[in-house]
Amino acid sequence: MKTFKKLSLAVCASALLIPTLSQAQGTYEGVGPKEGDREFSISGSGQSDKKFDNGSMGLSGEMGWYLNDQTVAGVRQSVGWGSVSGGSDDWSGGTRGYIDYHFGQAEFRPFVGANLGYKYYNHAKNSGVAGLELGAKYYVLPSTFVQARAEYGFLFDSKNSAKDNSSNGSWEYTVGMGYNF
């Protein structure tokens, strides 16, 4: 799992370079989405427990609709292959609804948000998940962006277990690209 930890750190470090790229480019006229626009993105994703001992890698796709120029709500689907310390490798997936608020109207647009959904596994008990997320989009063209996102999901199977499991969650992070239309 040392390789997985190194890869996780490399993905996070890469995400920190996006603001530097925004300083090097000129401004696009009319960059970014407007109210009523839709958004599709596909990303490579990774997930780990809070100690980064066990994890998975996979794909994540999402479809969103802009409620106004800065707020997008949508559905996210992920599927991954996992490696468990001392165990067998397995598949997992997740389906979540999300809402994100973007700051600013420039090429570089950081965002914060929340999500709620379901995680399913072939090696463990399926679980509900609620999480917080943050990330950034950088528009390389007026409607095309690269993005990086990190989210922490609290796992639960009832409202009582959500409270009890608030410190027992998982990290999920993505780096990918998307398009507004």
Image: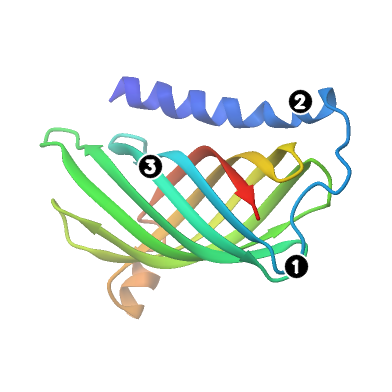
Residue mark closest to the camera, 2 vs 1: 1
Q: Which residue is mark 3?
A: 59
Kind of residue sitting beneath label 2: Thr
Q: Position of residue 37 (x, y in %)?
A: 68, 63
Q: Earlier in the sequence, mark 2 or mark 3?
A: 2
Distance Cα–Cα, label 2 vs label 3 = 26 Å
User: CB atoms at circles 2 and 3 under 8 Å apart?
Assistant: no
What crowding class fits label 2: few (fewer than 14 Cα within 10 Å), some (14-19), or many (20 or more)?
few
Q: Earlier in the sequence, mark 2 or mark 1?
A: 2
Distance Cα–Cα, label 2 vs label 1 = 28 Å
Farthest residue, direction bottom: 159
Q: Which residue is mark 1?
A: 35
**Side (left or right) of 109 relative to 123:** right
What crowding class fits label 3: few (fewer than 14 Cα within 10 Å), some (14-19), or many (20 or more)?
some
Instruction: Name the residue rendered at 22%, 63% in the picture.
Output: 126
Kind of residue sitting beneath label 3: Leu
Q: Which residue is mark 2?
A: 20
